[in-house]
Amino acid sequence: MIKTDTAISVIGLEKSFKNVKVLQNINFTVRKGSIFALLGSNGAGKTTTIKILSTLIKPDQGSAQVCGFDVVRQPHQVREEISLTGQNAAVDGVLTGRENLRLIGKLRHLPDTNKKADALLERFDLLEAADRRVATYSGGMRRRLDLSMSLLGTPSVVFLDEPTTGLDPQSRITMWKIIKDLAHSGVTVFLTTQYLDEADQLADQIFILDKGKIVAEGTASELKKLLPHGHIELRFRNEKEVQTAHNLLGDYKVSLDGENQALIVTTDGSIKQMTDILNRLQNAGLSVAEFAQKLPTLEDVFLTIIGENQGKEYVK
Amino acid sequence: MIIISGIKRNFSDTAVMSGRMMRHTFRSIDTLITVVAMPIMMLLLFVYVFGGAMNTGSIDYINFLVPGIVLFTIASGVAYTAVRLNNDVTAGIFDRFYSMPISKSSILGGHVLNSVVFNMFSVILVLLVALLIGFRPEAGLAEWLIVIGIVLLFTLAMTWVAVTFGLLANSSEGAGVFAYPMLALLFISSAFVPTESMPGIVRAFAEHQPMTPLIEAVRSLLMNEPVGNNALIAVIWCVGILIAFYIAAMQIYKCKAA
Ligand SMILES: Nc1ncnc2c1ncn2[C@@H]1O[C@H](COP(=O)(O)OP(=O)(O)O)[C@@H](O)[C@H]1O
Ligand SMILES: [Mg+2]
């Protein structure tokens, strides 16, 4: 049953390529106007999911609805509602930015394409480069043009496949802001990413996909509770100090990074433990050359969650 | 096939798509040079360098040569259709088009229409140069119309061959490779020398492959001579190739998209 505030609903989706199961029993719903992130490493099945939802390929089993239309039986209605910004910027390098937008506008049979194109060029800070061939654009500019082409038809659902992969930090932040603004304006955003911080920054709802299966789901803060505890890195000036510190912190889980004269200490992330560690070092007259708190990476999350999963299977 | 609803939309989408491809074609200087200048150089080379040694009987060598050069222009021109199409497929813009509510046939249709228009443009340029250096056709209006029909049909058939290879190839370098056997077929035909001068087995091949009846038909029509059944054979070849490659291309296209 489809509630009216549901933009996407997926039930029991399966897809194989030549006997290799790429998606297995995928279920989720996406609320209208929210940002949904599908988080997973390379080869997890993110692009395949997006391709099914945007009617490019058909699922083997299960069903998917976008804005109440079935992607297999009503692909044309689905296409009227969506826009796809693929993993590779789908822009035409031979045409100028303006021509790219006008091309899409004409194909969508919009009444005032030229005016809308200009407005988007301005909004995405591309006005200056509008009449240059897209082949001369930077990666960030291509992505922005790509996205503006997707928005030309005022879609109600936007699919973004790894929108910031390969972008420099500045362009990445710009893209984040654009995506947030998009959701504020009522558009439903379905994005895939390999970066935990990106999902954290943007998404209302995060699903973690691993080898074609959903292994965890929730809001960013819910997921963070599943994360392994943070660890800190302590760097010293010489081998001897590293050794002394190692002995002092014997009751913690410590690993040695001899090459960098550093210790990596696993903590529960609390201030109490942190102060305890630093106090011990200070009392022993050791001065820390460098101190860094390491955030858990997506790799850590996977290792923990997938490790748990395998454990469960083992018990069964 | 396409004759369901939305024919108007189909036409306008195809026009937009081929407008895009026109920009591609006319913005790349190397395409223009290769597609137009190459056949013109061939024309000059054969007329002024080899022409003196050719024995084409009662017919002037340049008049003998022009139909072959026209086919050469088209056979090399469609290689670019394959390359451009392949670029679209591999670069992801196909996915964008495919996820849009546009007529599916317009995506390939734009490439096909552009290929036909551009090749006709090249053929006209080549014919103008031929006229300048002494090509003197004797065809009347009816013969010219039949020639135009045959040349269009050949272009369409070659274009669908190009579409098939453009969809199949893994890279744009590979996409244009099919043009070489096409050009080889032209060289082993009556395009440049009469087949009578060839040794037995080569001659037998030359006379039974599609290029020779095409060339013979166009040549006879242009010189206002009896065509015999060459025109019919040529049309059958072209329609056969067209249908076979249209079906192959559509099949591959559907697989790519699903
Ligand atoms: N057309 C295809 N044919 C065969 N295997 C494919 C095809 N597309 C994707 N795959 C495989 O499916 C898996 C998931 O791919 P994909 O959805 O692209 O992952 P992601 O986008 O998360 O990196 C990969 O192992 C990939 O090799
Ligand atoms: Mg991907």
Image (spheres, coloured by chain):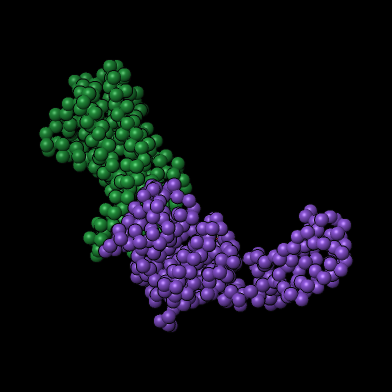
- Chain coloured green in this rendering: B
Q: Quadrant of the N terminus of chain A?
A: bottom left
Shade representing chain A? purple
Mark count: 0
Q: Which residue is drawn at 50% across and 72% down?
A: A36
Q: Which residue is drawn at 20% across and 27% down?
A: B131
Q: Is residue A33 above or below residue A111?
A: below
Q: Which residue is drawn at 79% across and 53% down?
A: A259
Nearest the eye: A124 or B251: A124
Find residue B132 and report its horizontal and vertical position in percent: 21, 26
Q: Quadrant location of residue B32?
A: top left
Q: In this view, does A304 lie above or below A90?
A: below
Find residue B253 and report its horizontal and vertical position in percent: 38, 55
Residue B93 appears in the picture as rendered:
no
Q: Residue furthest top?
A: B52
Q: Residue at x 46, y 65 (%)?
A: A178
Q: In which quarter of the image is the C terminus of chain A?
A: bottom right
Find residue B97 and report its horizontal and vertical position in percent: 37, 58
Nearest the eye: B14 or A291: A291
Residue B50 appears in the picture as rendered:
yes
Q: Quadrant location of residue A232?
A: bottom right
Q: In this view, does B142 lie above or below A313?
A: above
Nearest the eye: B180 or A101: A101
Nearest the eye: A212 or A101: A101
Find residue A59 and report its horizontal and vertical position in percent: 46, 68
